[in-house]
Structure formats: C-alpha cells, structure tokens
Amino acid sequence: MTAGVDQIGAKIGEIETEMKRIDMWQQAPLDPEKYEFHSAFAMDTMAYSQWLQFVFIPRVHEAIASNGSFPQQSNVGAQAIREFDGYDEASGLVTLLCEFDALIEGRA
C-alpha cells in the first residue's frame, strides 16, 4: 500500500470515531430499500449521516482492502458543509471530511 492509501484509511478511522463521538453513528442497520437510491449522496432515501456510515465508509474500506482505485476528486466535505451548516457539534466532522477531499485530490 502506498502512503496515500494509509493516510486515507487513517482519515476514515477518524471520521468514524468523530461520528460516534457526536452521536451521529446509527446502531440499527438500514432497511434494504434505503440502498435503492438514485440521487447523489442517496439524498432520496437516507440522511447524509446515514450515507456516510452505510455507503461512503464501507466503500472506502473496500477500495483500500482490494487495492482499488479512488476517484480523482471527492466532494464529501463540500456536501458536509451544506448538510451540517449551523450544527456546531459537527464542525470537527466537517473538517475531517474536507481533509478527506484534500487527500483524494492530492492523489490525482
């Protein structure tokens, strides 16, 4: 693994830890129909925090485990800014997601 992949893995760990710290981590699994989304960030079937937990984080873990490729850019931080505007408890999470974007874009 390259250092970049290690950094991405570490950042995902930080994101997960922060989501748990601010009580944004959901214990119960999602209903299967929630995964039948058609819009960006699954906004048509789930909350952004659910998408982070149930779609984004697992996909990043899968890409790391399979030495898969990452996109050339990421917009999870930009979306987090929109979603969590005014939610002060999420400011650390927003920062971590923006840092994730920077890691991905630094690989391009």
Image (spheres, rainbow, N blue to C red):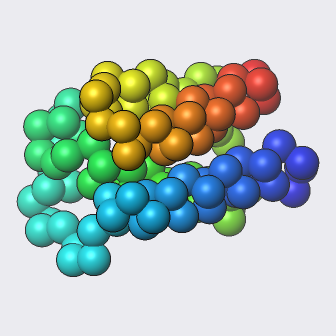
Residue that sits furthest to the front in the current view = 88
**Image quarter (top left, top right, bottom left or bottom right) of the N terminus:** bottom right
Seen from the viewer's position, the closer of residues 1 and 102 is 102
State the residue at coordinates (50%, 57%): 18
Residue that sits furthest to the bottom in the current view = 28
The answer to which quarter of the image holds residue 14 is: bottom right
State the residue at coordinates (28%, 28%): 86
Q: Is residue 65 above or below residue 86?
A: below
Seen from the viewer's position, the closer of residues 66 and 19 is 19
Seen from the viewer's position, the closer of residues 82 and 87 is 87
Q: Position of residue 52 (x, y in %)?
A: 38, 50
Asked whether the viewer can see residue 58, the reply is: no
Q: Position of residue 48 (x, y in %)?
A: 27, 42
State how many labels appear: 0
**Image quarter (top left, top right, bottom left or bottom right) of the C terminus:** top right
State the residue at coordinates (39%, 59%): 22
Asked whether the viewer can see residue 60, the reply is: yes
Q: Is residue 105 above or below residue 62?
A: above
Q: Position of residue 100 (x, y in %)?
A: 62, 37
State the residue at coordinates (23%, 40%): 42
Q: Is residue 72 above or below residue 53?
A: above
Q: Position of residue 13 (x, y in %)?
A: 62, 61
